[in-house]
Image (tube, rainbow, N blue to C red):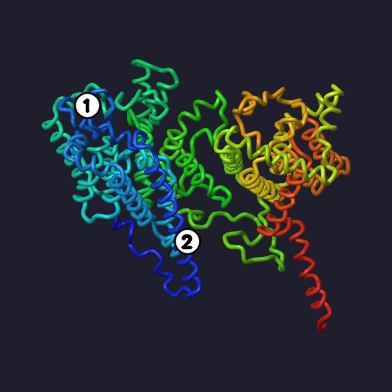
Amino acid sequence: MANVEHGGRPGDGFVRAPETVRARLHALRAGLWAVAAILAVRQVATALGTPRAERLTDLGTWVGPNGVAHVKGSLYDGTRFSGTPFGGLVLRPLTRSAEQALGWGWTFGTLLLVVALGLVAARALPPPVSRRTALLAAPVGVSLLMLSLPVRNALSLGQTGIIPVLLVLLGCFAVRGERACGVLVGLAAALQPTVLLFTPLLWCTARRRAAVSTAVTFATLTALAWAAMPRDSAVYWAHHPAGVGLGGGADDPANQSLHGALLRFGLTGPLEIGLFLALGAVVAVVGLRRAVRYARDGQLLLAVAVTGCVAVAVSPATWQHQVLWVLLAVVGRAGRKASDRLVWPVAVVLVMTLPTRMMLPDMPVLDPLRDNTVLIAALAAATLVPFLSRTSAHYRAPLPAERAAPVPSRFRRIPLLPSGRVLTRPNLLLELLLIRVGYSAYQQVRLAATGGTVAGGRAGAERHGGQVAAVERFLHLDIERWANHAAVRTPFLRDLFDFYYESFHFVVPLTVLAVLYVRRPADFRWARSALAFATLLALVGFWLYPLAPPRLMPGLGIVDTVHGVQDFSKPDYGTLTALTNQYAAMPSLHFGWSLWCGAVVVVLAPRRWMKALGLLHPLLTLSAIVATGNHWVLDAVGGAAVVAAGFALTRLAQGPRPRTAVAGVEEAVRPSVRAGDRGPG
């Protein structure tokens, strides 16, 4: 495999590249390695900063004072140890040294394994590999591994799922000779039995010595463990086939295999076992056929990833530290269009780095998706995603997005940004993924601004509220109490403002985005970018300046018309304020998002009555947030400021709207055309 994969050195055709290009690439590479180092330091600090009783708990199952590797009986007493008997055989002699190095030694050893895995995976990219890709692949790969949940668990909990993946990659891409390859893959299979699925991959890609060596190595090591620990081997292979039921219930959401998913769906007994075997056989056949095809196509790293994803799905128990194969599938290229090319890698990275509750709303109807996210990604990689062949015309050159001509005077020295406004519609799935993750980050930052609890920021938020109230009195803008009491005395106004506050905050912006996506795709990109910048700036405001709204200011006399009476004698004012951060008031995104909607409608709407409605929405929102006691007037000023900054940053980063950009180019070209018309003849 390694010989086929690396027929030439990546980037040989770039030897004569200009020195400036080389310097920029090396500077960018150094920056990416710095990012990877920062992430590594962060993960190590988090692992070492965890209380001793909570750190490396999985490793503690075999090295503690009562760990199974010290017990003369079975490794599987108590079902806490879930490794193979061979794994226990290897770990027993290491218990003493592991106890001495339980903290620093294990953590930094795992860190070195992660770096090695990233380097080997980067070296395994299929040719032709550009110089830029060859230089940047390794730090990007290490960074993604550092962010992935399996690696974070390995660092903090002491799990060993990185070792089989690294052994397989070393066997396929680093060592010379088929026998050495088979020994490494067989060793990985002795630690994780489903790795045996690589045997048919090796056999069908004309590496039959490696396949035989894999089987022989696995059989020899397993037999050695059986001879040394017959009781443990009988428990693992007979009573708990391939580890089923060890380390936790098979229906636990941490088990991301088909078997675990079927149990979570309520199937049990012979029906579940028969369905699991049938589905597993189908996935194995389809996935291995695809892996062989990609291997013969020269995409051997993708073939390894697909085979690993098959192993994730068909294993009776696949715990979170064993799903690292899915991240390797990010190397597959899917989609003929440039707008489609990022969907698969972004989806894989999100699945492997973020908790599922950040990607999917916390709704019962979505529980089947949320509980099986990694399994779905593995099944998609193994059986469904149409990865492009290297012979495809779109493998290296996807169909480009249509762009507006750049304005001649546009500021061009912002790195990593496109040179013109894109006119085509972006990929919907990618947009939805980013919107969901962005909103989840917005929720997390709101809570983190007060240390994760509302009570934690109460004193500072109330102090800031007093400052805002004083400034408003000085500017004669302190109308909150008058507006609030006027609404309370008028039931119609109170009901109107309560309904408007609760109902239109999300509905109107999402509607505007949906209409633009369908009818005005180029303007959708412009408007979406402005909204994203405004929201990011607002998050900075929430973080730096937690602010109590008027309804949560003791002694101000504001009636909370939406949420009900708050008990100021309680640290969290009651149930509602204990659930979410009520101090994310400055700037007001209620008003900011409504103002964004109004500005977009006024600029783009073709009818005057539509523009009038666009202006009416922020006016009603401002009235609602003040009358209900949820915001100060200055909060709305802050919301207007971040929206204005959002549009300004969008223009700076991407240039003016496409129509304006094209018009600017036409105006720039027209004088030269006229001059040409006045030429000779």
Of residues 328 and 70, which is closer to you in this image?
70
Mark 1 element type: helix
**Residue 632 at x, y percent in the picture:** 76, 39
Of residues 643 and 515, which is closer to you in this image?
643
**Residue 228 at x, y percent in the picture:** 12, 32
Instruction: Mark 2: give few (<14), some (14-19) or many (20+) Cα within 10 Å.
Output: some
Instruction: Mark 1: give few (<14), some (14-19) or many (20+) Cα within 10 Å.
Output: some
Residue occupied by mark 1: 237
Kind of residue at badge 1? Trp
**Residue 39 at x, y percent in the picture:** 44, 51
Q: Which mark is residue 31?
A: 2
Examine the rendering and report whether any part of residue 310 can be seen.
no
**Residue 553 at x, y percent in the picture:** 72, 33
Number of marks in the rendered image: 2
Kind of residue at badge 2? Gly
Examine the rendering and report whether any part of residue 121 can be seen.
yes
Image-based side of 248 in relation to 361, left or right: left
Q: Is residue 261 above or below residue 637?
A: above
Image-based side of 115 in relation to 419, left or right: left
Residue drawn where x is 19% and y is 50% of the image: 179
Considering every residue shown, the one lying at the far left of the view is 227
Q: Is residue 3 above or below residue 234?
A: below
Q: Earlier in the sequence, mark 1 or mark 2?
A: 2
